[in-house]
Image (cartoon, rainbow, N blue to C red):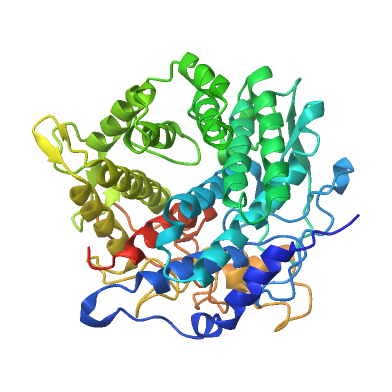
Amino acid sequence: MMPLLPSSSSSRAGLVLAVAVVSLLSCSSHVAAGGRHDYGDALAKAILFFQGQRSGRLPQDQAVTWRSHSGLSDGSAANVDLTGGYYDGGDNVKFGFPMAFTTTMLSWSVLEHGGRMPTTRARDAARAAVRWGADYLLKAAARAAAGTLYVGVGDADADHRCWERPEDMDTPRTVYAVSASAPGSDVAGETAAALAAASMVFRAADKAYARRLLDAARAVMGLAVRYQGKYSDHVGDNVGAYYASYSGYKDELLWGSAWLLWATKNTSYLNYLNSLGANDGVDMFSWDNKLAGARVLLARRTLVDGDKRFDPFRQQAEDFICRVLPNSPSSTTQYTPGGLMHKSGYANLQYVASATFLLTTYAKYMAVSKRVFYCQTLRVTSKSLRALAKKQVDYILGDNPLGMSYMVNYGARWPRRIHHRASSMPSVAAHPAHIGCQEGFQRYYYSGGANPNVHTGAVVGGPDERDAYPDDRADYSRSEPTTYTNAPLVGCLAYLAGKPNK
């Protein structure tokens, strides 16, 4: 089986990034003069994180050198090449649902805020991160026209009973798929969104690749619409215990249609999304529930393009914002004493990053259209949304009661014992001998020492509702980083890097 080979554009972007990456890997960053955060530095690190999450055959210009090749036989159980892609967090499973969301949000970050990234190096590195995910999703969608979409690799239960480096893993690499007999409209709709969004990222630079992505997006969306159901009800092996589709699949049908409408300008997608009747009010945006994201994306057509057919989505987007703003009479969002949004006791910063991305993006739309709206008596402007977004990002970067940055290797104080197998164990270069499943637990997981490999840019789950953070490897709900936390944060940091004093 052919291993994943890096594309030429990915390789070039990685090479450019590698030139400047030594300082990012060797020392923590600083806060800019005058106490302001260095958003450009944080952005570079947030993007670099994705290199540490790579699966497959790594390119020669791989900058995160404590990682090596892994999962080189992925897909062989189903006679298909599923090498590559990303591990979602600190484990060694490839879950298609959050990986597709990660790719969508990285793409949206580039499309919406790439022009504000302070350097071409950052833009190239962000596109390379998109392409690593998109290359894998193309493989997963290779048989979509025939009715099959591959949605995961690795037995999650077996994997979670081991503490192994990706390079050492010897747990089953089971392949999971959705199809006509085992529908998964949620994961298929999200995969279609990711492929469509990525196609726009590469439309100018690599037209042939962009066409392949868009063709695959259409095929996968057709699968989502024709065979409707929740993937976590059908794929088996307890996959639903990890990334169950709690919100159902209507939000992904809306989300996928919204992205294909933007990518193709085909009004049949508008007719379809209008037929869905997805009218639930929401105050959260995540890998599971896409309603708020789809509404903000569609509101763009009214605020930026002036198309009044999308005004109902603009109203729903503003309802979401009113549920998030701390001083809004209709707010349903809790804030910690230190001022951080608190949506969940599990990996809360993922929800903060995603909601903050929508605030920055809607602020951009409002500034373009000079729009002001009201949450009952509260006047909302683009400036007020920027201020809240900046406060959330600054909290993550260290402006909080503990004075701790929740991004690894940014600032003077940051988490040292993150819940991440590869980071917490010596690299293959430092320790070539195989480290077994239980040996990993005994020697490294339960160790109180700092992780030997600094996973630069990783954003952990974050503090609790009282702003407390124990820096405990075993407390995975707070100490595990995920790709779907970093992906929207890339857009937030790019937005702030463009005007660091605003």
Which quadrant holds residue 381?
A: top left
Going by the image, does 35 lie left or right of 487? left
**Number of numbered discs on residues:** 0
Going by the image, does 364 lie left or right of 66? left
Which quadrant holds residue 497?
A: bottom left
Q: Position of residue 402 (x, y in %)?
A: 26, 69
Going by the image, does 102 lie left or right of 479? right
User: Along the line of sight, which residue is nearer the eye, 242 or 51?
Assistant: 51
User: Along the line of sight, which residue is nearer the eye, 342 or 222?
Assistant: 222
Q: Which part of the image, by quadrant, shows the C terminus?
A: bottom left
Residue at screen point 30% across, 69% down: 398
Q: Position of residue 86 (x, y in %)?
A: 65, 55
Q: Position of residue 239 (x, y in %)?
A: 65, 38
Going by the image, does 152 lie left or right of 112? right
Above or below residue 439? Residue 269 is above
Q: Which part of the image, by quadrant, shows the N terminus?
A: bottom right
Residue at screen point 42% across, 81% down: 28
Residue at screen point 53% across, 72% down: 121
Q: Is residue 227 visible?
A: no
Above or below residue 217? Residue 28 is below
Residue at screen point 32% across, 35% down: 303
Q: Is residue 330 visible?
A: yes
User: Along the line of sight, which residue is nearer the eye, 499 or 368?
Assistant: 368
Above or below residue 37? Residue 247 is above
